[in-house]
């Protein structure tokens, strides 16, 4: 055997981290990095948060896994808390966002099946979307680079342009079951969907007896300064997929639905071996303990404004590197003038971690617990990285 024993499906940065402290990661060589990638919006409360560590270790000493053949009290508690805090009546726990989306898709199709319309299985989705890496979710996302080489695209997904609600309306047929959308696209380049567009989609669903499905895997659990991003628009879905931040670093996902939308999800029609296990539920409940504390989300909003205003200043100073600042809450994107890969390298040279996205955007997804001092430190490092790249661009142009 030559090389690594791992599948070569990741292009990894030459960094190995030994441990983390809040917003900081420390390499095996002792170098400290300011983590504004958050494991791709996963580490919602930073690294080694004491309340999460306590919840996980306490549960680990008692019970890890029993399967869903038995009652799991932590699962019932987390489900009730999510239902109490949202539009939902029912929750199905998974291990990942992709699994949560698979459950959401199946729930929407099953809803129409039990109502006597098995022909209604198609789902309208939007350009730039990312819903996961399973065969169904890559079909829902519709991006060729994820579909290529995996055989025929899974049938049942009709894609229209980003924020093209007129096209979405025209795409509705007698076979349409639902509309699936991210209130803020993450992988697609930190693109919030306008409030009016989400309201129109809700109206279309009411008018045509469709289910509105929100993918809040990346933008949920406080990331935008509300528990869920759709709350800013005052629009509620029938079904919602969440993951990432709800586990704070532990693999947890969930599909939330109203009683009506979940009417077809009866005993035996769907399942999971690991989903909702005691370890995951202990951590999920601990995350909610923190995120639902009085004032927590308001403080996220305040810190987000501080960061966004600072980034706008950097963009004004170095327009040859950063064109614009996108996003909401602590889900922000640098729309880059230079290639986002080069901007990412420039920031990494400053020991600041970010995450590339589509549309030449670089994502900043710090933990919701980031401090004001760390935001100022990040802005200094981003400014330094942008200055170095701007100087290099000017030098290359002068040759």
Image (cartoon, grey):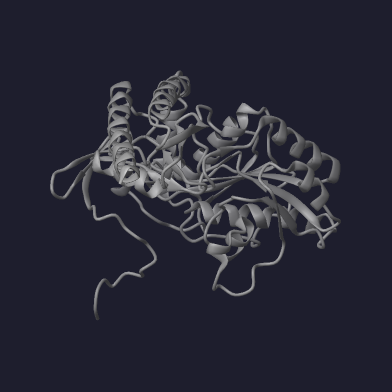
- Image coords of residue 183 (percent x, y): 61, 38
Q: Is residue 134 visible?
A: no
Q: Position of residue 39 (x, y in %)?
A: 37, 46
Asked if residue 383 lies left or right of residue 307, the reply is left
Residue lying furthest front: 399
Return the x and y of residue 332 as percentages of the image width and height: 46, 34
Q: Residue 70: where, in percent of width, then height? A: 50, 55
Nearer to us in this view, 388 or 397: 397
Relative placement, left or right, of 36 versus 359 is left
Which residue occupies 84% across, 59% down?
A: 117
Q: Residue furthest bottom?
A: 1
- Left or right relative to 182: residue 196: right
Q: Is residue 64 left or right of residue 214?
A: left
Q: Residue at 85% of width from left, 41% of height from top? A: 207
| Quadrant showing the N terminus | bottom left
Image position of 49 with respect to 59: above or below = above
Comparing 86 with 134, the one in front is 134
């Amino acid at each position: 055997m030559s090389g690594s024993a791992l599948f070569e499906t990741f292009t990894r940065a030459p960094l190995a981290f030994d441990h983390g402290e809040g917003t900081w990661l420390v390499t095996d060589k002792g170098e400290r990095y300011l983590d504004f990638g958050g494991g791709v919006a996963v580490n919602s409360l930073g690294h080694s948060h004491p309340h999460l560590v306590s919840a996980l270790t306490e549960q680990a000493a008692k019970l890890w896994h029993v399967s869903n053949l038995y009652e799991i009290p932590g699962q019932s508690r987390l489900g009730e808390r999510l239902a109490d805090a949202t539009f939902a009546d029912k929750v199905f726990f998974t291990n990942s966002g992709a699994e949560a989306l698979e459950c959401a898709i199946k729930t929407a199709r099953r809803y129409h099946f039990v109502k006597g319309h098995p022909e209604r299985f198609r789902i309208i989705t939007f350009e730039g979307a990312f819903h996961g890496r399973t065969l169904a979710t890559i079909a829902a996302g519709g991006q060729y680079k994820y579909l290529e080489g995996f055989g025929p695209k899974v049938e049942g997904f009709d894609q229209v342009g980003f924020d093209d609600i007129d096209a979405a309306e025209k795409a509705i047929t007698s076979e349409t079951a639902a509309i699936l959308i991210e209130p803020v696209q993450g992988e697609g380049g930190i693109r919030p969907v306008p409030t009016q567009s989400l309201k129109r989609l809700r109206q279309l669903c009411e008018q045509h007896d469709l289910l509105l499905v929100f993918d809040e895997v990346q933008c949920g659990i406080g990331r935008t300064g509300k528990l869920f991003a759709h709350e800013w628009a005052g629009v509620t879905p029938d079904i919602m997929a969440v993951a990432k931040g709800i586990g704070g670093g532990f693999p947890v996902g969930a599909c939330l639905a109203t009683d009506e939308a979940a009417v077809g999800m009866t005993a035996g029609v769907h399942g999971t071996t690991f989903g909702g296990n005691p370890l995951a539920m202990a951590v999920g409940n601990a995350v909610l303990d923190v995120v639902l504390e009085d004032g927590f989300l308001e403080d996220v909003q305040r810190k987000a404004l501080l960061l966004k205003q600072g980034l706008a200043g950097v963009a004004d100073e170095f327009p040859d590197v950063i064109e614009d600042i996108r996003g909401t809450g602590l889900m922000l994107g640098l729309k880059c003038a230079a290639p986002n890969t080069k901007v990412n390298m420039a920031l990494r040279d400053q020991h600041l971690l970010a995450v590339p996205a589509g549309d030449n955007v670089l994502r900043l997804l710090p933990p919701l617990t980031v401090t004001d001092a760390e935001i100022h430190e990040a802005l200094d490092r981003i400014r330094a990285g942008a200055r170095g790249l701007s100087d290099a661009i000017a030098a290359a142009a002068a040759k």
